[in-house]
Amino acid sequence: MKVFKFGGASVKNAEGVRNVADVVKRSGLDDLVIVVSAMGKTTNALEAITWAWLDGRPLNEAVDALEKAHGDILLEVAPEDRTAHVRLGDEFRAMRALLGGKPTKNIDRHYDQIVSFGEMWSSIIVQAHLNAAGVASAWWDARAVVRTDARYRAAGVNWEASAKGAEQFLANAPKSPLRVVTQGFIGSAPDGSTTTLGREGSDFSAAIFAYLLNAESVTIWKDVAGMFNADPHVFPDTKLLERISYREAIELSYFGASVIHPRTLQPLQRKNIPLYVRSFLDAAAEGSTISEATDRDTLVPSFIVKAQQLLISITPRDLSFIVEENLSAIFKVFAERNVRIDLMQNSALAFSVAVDDTPRSRELIQELGKDYQVRYNEACQLITVRHYDEKTLDQLLKDKDVLIEQRSRTTARFVVK
């Protein structure tokens, strides 16, 4: 058993869907679970529909556009698959029925029910084309396997319940070969409602399936040739990280490397399942391998640059020390506002953090300002360098104003303007 994951960029149009079939054929695999994301920018479009519905704004035109776009792709890649055409129509009718109701106050729950349709549509189309292209496969609803809690938009996996779902999956799946198309990003809450695992959660879905089914490996097919020591779209002369460890990849993901979802690697590491990152544009290229081996982790400095950061400094109004009581109250506000701290540093009187500049972060500043003196710098960058050397740091920090600097033996981090 192997797991392939194809993201939205790889299935954004009919050509991409055909390429998925070509990649699968070239792999020569029999037992395979294929996890797909929503097509292209479908998730963004569904988010816009969600907000329009919650605000009472017109949305029929946007829904019609999505239905036509998906219907046209299906007609192009699997014109004779009547089952797929009916299933796709049923999914759009289900969404229209949902949007015909009245919203409740549980916005995150509504979000998951609506946005999850993107993966359903995509998986129906990909599976239909695989069959049309001579790659026999079955369609499976990921929600029957991936069981979660009811924390909508960021659901936690119930591993015990999911293991039972996987047993049922194997009992009902085709036996020879076991080739299945399913959805990333989604699961089901205890009440059966749809949940999502957080944006870009399809990588995590692939790891969940691999863990539950004791897969031999996971391959994530991207529009880049693997994991690089920096973003190849931004920096020239980047180097491919051909082999790195789970630990190193988790660190890079945590610090902001966008190739792998941060939660993806933990279940794979627990069962020592290797992860391959390869390009769907050049399936013959070797790509990157992530495994237990650590011998190559320190060979090349890796750096991540996060733009549009707020550097927020929080000081008690009475100039009392920043102690545990203050930090507890401050962290509570961050948790309630769902604002992730990318970097933190404290002195006797101030607690400083770097966070993404989002509406939630701006609201958090207003909230903290009720009890604390709050100052902030905007339009900052957060630079993180793993296995740094002074030459790399000099290049990255040239002409920058360093506001915060932190160093350990393996990692250097800077907030700069």
Image: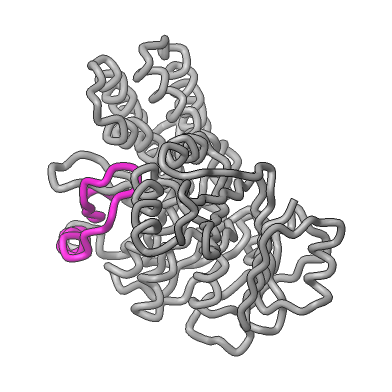
Nearer to us in this view, 299 or 364: 364
Residue 238 in the image: state x and y as whole percent: 77, 66
- Would residue 277 appear left or right of 180 to someone viewing this image? right
Residue 109 vs 225, above or below: the answer is above
Q: Quarter-wise, where is residue 304 in the image?
A: bottom right
Q: Looking at the image, can residue 1 be seen?
A: yes
Q: Is residue 194 left or right of residue 254?
A: left
Q: Residue at x 46, y 44 (%)?
A: 372
Question: Residue extending furthest right?
Answer: 399
What residue is drawn where x is 65% and y is 45%?
377
Q: Say which residue appears at 33% left-offset and 62% top-offset.
A: 209
Name the spot of residue 132 as percent of width and height, x first.
44, 43
Q: Which residues are magenta?
A: 142-169
Q: What residue appears at the point 51 percent right and 57 percent down from the top-left corner? A: 351
Give the left or right position of residue 324, taking residue 315 as reference.
left
Provide residue 362's location: percent of width, then percent of height.
Answer: 52, 36
Name the residue nearer the viewer: 191 or 163: 191
Q: Nearer the viewer, residue 379 or 330?
A: 330
Asked whether residue 129 is drawn in magenta, I would say no
Does the magenta segment cover residue 154? yes
- Picture quarter containing residue 382? bottom right
The quarter of the picture where the N terminus appears is: bottom left
Q: Nearer the viewer, residue 393 or 219?
A: 393
Q: Measuring from the top left, give residue 21's x and y in whole percent.
A: 51, 51
